[in-house]
Image: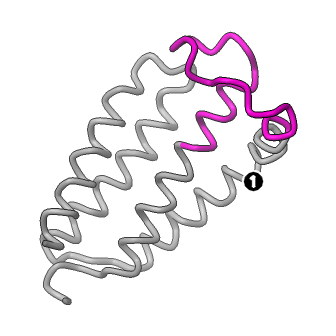
Amino acid sequence: MKRWIYALVCILSLLAAALQYNDPDPIRWIAMYGYVALLYALALTGRYRSEAIWVGLAMVVIWAATLLPGFVEWLHEGMPSITGQMKAELPHVEIVREFLGLLLCGVALWGLAQGGPIGGS
């Protein structure tokens, strides 16, 4: 079961990375989602480095902290829709989407830190 979950997260992260090509800042997002995919792929093959996961989590926390004020402001505004259009015409739309993307990356990395490599279970 664990192998399927790791493979699914790896594939979904690769897909998310591929979909970032038209983002306003694609390199950062391709790198972030790609990093998550790489770590899950390495865990699948048993080449697990917990230090790399903690580095990734640190990057997520620092990056998310820069977006937190905008996310909190969006919450205070009553959480207006961020799904109306794919193009983010209002500033909070891009901030909230990026914050939630980082949250997904953080949850995936935290899950990997808790689950360990496939060979280690």
Please, what secondary structure does the residue beneath circle 1 have?
helix
Of residue 86 and residue 10, the one placed in the foreground of this image is: 86
Q: Along the horizontal axis of the image, is 88 left or right of 114?
A: right
Residue 65 location (% of width, % of height): 75, 53
Residue 83 location (% of width, % of height): 56, 21
Furthest residue in direction front, as rendered? 78
The quarter of the rendered structure image containing the N terminus is bottom left
Residue found 35% across the figure and 46% down from its top? 34
For mark 1, does the 10 Å Cα neighbourhood hold few (<14), some (14 to 19), or many (20 or more) residues?
few
Furthest residue in direction bottom, as rendered? 121
Residue found 84% across the figure and 44% down from its top? 69
Residue found 73% across the figure and 25% down from its top? 80
Residue 77 location (% of width, % of height): 85, 31
Residue 62 location (% of width, % of height): 69, 57
- Quarter-of-image position of residue 95: top right
Residue found 17% across the figure and 58% down from its top? 7
Judging from the image, the colouring scheme is one colour
- Quarter-of-image position of residue 6: bottom left
Residue type pointed to by label 1? Ala
Q: Along the horizontal axis of the image, is 61 left or right of 102?
A: right
Q: Along the horizontal axis of the image, is 23 left or right of 90?
A: left
Please provide the residue range marked out in magenta: 73-100
Relative vertical location of residue 103 with respect to residue 70 in this rendering, above or below:
below
User: Is 56 in the magenta?
Assistant: no
Relative vertical location of residue 67 with respect to residue 10 in this rendering, above or below:
above
The quarter of the rendered structure image containing the C terminus is bottom left
- Number of residue marks: 1
User: Is 86 in the magenta?
Assistant: yes
Relative vertical location of residue 83 with respect to residue 108 in this rendering, above or below:
above
Q: Along the horizontal axis of the image, is 98 left or right of 120?
A: right
Label 1 sits on residue: 65
